Amino acid sequence: HFVHATPLDRLGNNMQMHHALFATVVLAASTCANAGELFLLGLVPQAYAESTSDNGLVVAGYDPQSYWYWTRETGVVQLIGTTVSPGNGVGGQGCISADGRFMSVSSLQGDAQKAEGTIYDIDLALFQPIGSYGFHCDIERCSIWGMTRDAQSAVGLIDQGPCDAIAFKWSAATNAFTNLGTLYFFKPSRANAVSNDGATIAGWNDDYSGFRQAAVWRRNAKGVYAQQNLTTVVNGFTVKLREAVSLSGDGSWVYGLGSSGIDSGAPWRWSVATGYQPILPNPMGEAIGSVVSANHDGSMLLAYFGAGAALGEGYVWLADRGWLTLESYATERGVAIPAGVHLALPLNMSEDGLTIVGTARGNFGMSPFVLDLRVVVDCVADLNHDGFVSAPDMAALLSDWGLD
């Protein structure tokens, strides 16, 4: 199931339609383009579109049955029977590579049928588990929560003993794990995101009360990842920041989940140069916000505020404009959002910000969505392919008039 935005009218498909083309040219010089589209993928509770290829043509997600991928041609393709989706004794996220070929899933391995983080090759329909230390908790040995855009590195959580979870980085080149450790002895940590070059990793480290404190691991000149747990100062007291969720592509900015009572619950960003910065003002008063995705340099952010898809709202943040609801931003870009549809839980976007994915709500219930904001230049009247219908096109038409 999907909803199409209304594209601009298109003309015929061959040069022999002289009169129609001539009428188009002489009416006005105009751009020749089709607006983006909103796709609602299916009315399935607890289904989430989590990641998109750079060109927006392949999307990864999961529902209670399995992980899946989606394209316009195939629709939703479920990986049933092999993958185990989050919430069934395992965790993880459906990350996808920039080229749309590789995605992260959890798959059952061995006679014991324990779940391991796995890279799935969509083109070859091939599952490549990344391995484990041999220990598990529930049915999980390890899970992938973040992946570089080239799929050569993955990060997440792995059991280094029975129910003894720790953050890891895995390298495809060596097929080996880097144990990222913990700064609270015998307490778990998890990596949520990794920069494009693999040098910066963000996540959380449980403290002794079970609070998930923001953690950052940065690779130094010796190739070693040094951990830092993040704090800020409120009314003269040092307080811990909640978990780090995402990174800018270049790794310069870390983004995290807001806290009740700290800067109105607004999401935050952190860099080595600036330290903690709340992203204010909070567009929903005191609602807790989280930045789930950022472009390469952090000039565009994707976030949600409030209680998820059921009650929350999706937003984009632009460096020169601040917060905009995702629906209003889509409308500005020429996509008609049906009445009553809220793009309430955005979860990821392409680095150019032109494809945004997540879960929407409406009077139909819940549905994963793909918001395509790309403008496609495609019409017959644009004879010189410059994106406009104007005088040069009329000149080209007249020069060929009457020719076979």
Image (spheres, helix red, strand yellow):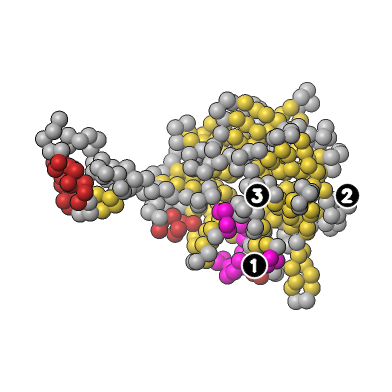
Q: Secondary structure at mark 2?
A: loop
- Left or right? Give the position of 29 relative to 127: left
Residue at the outermost left position: 402
Q: Name above or below for residue 44 compared with residue 322.
A: above
Q: Residue 149 at x, y = what percent? A: 60, 43
Rendering coords of residue 310 (x, y %): 57, 53
What kind of element bears circle 1?
A: strand
Place residue 72 in its image quadrant: top left
**Tag nearer the camera, 3 or 2:** 3
What residue sits right under mark 2 in the picture?
186
Task: Tell which circle, 1 or 2, labels the residue nearer the N-terminal end.
Answer: 2
User: What is the three-letter code of the residue carrying label 1?
Assistant: Pro
Quadrant the C terminus occupies: top left
Please determine whether, in this image, residue 24 is positioned above or below residue 229. Answer: above
Magenta segment: 273-298
Tell me, yes or no, whether the two marked residues, 3 and 1, touch with CB atoms within 8 Å: no
Residue found at the far top of this picture: 111
How far apart are the alpha carbons under marks 3 and 1? 21 Å
How far apart are labels 3 and 2 at the CA level? 27 Å
Is residue 139 shown to the viewer in this render?
Answer: no
The answer to which of marks 3 and 2 sits earlier in the sequence is 2
**Disc 3 vs disc 1: which is toward the camera?**
3
x%, y% of residue 402? 11, 35
Give the amino acid type for the residue marked by disc 3 in the picture: Ser
Q: Which mark is residue 195?
A: 3
Q: Amino acid at mark 2?
A: Phe
N-term mark: 3 or 1: 3
One can see residue 130 in this view: yes
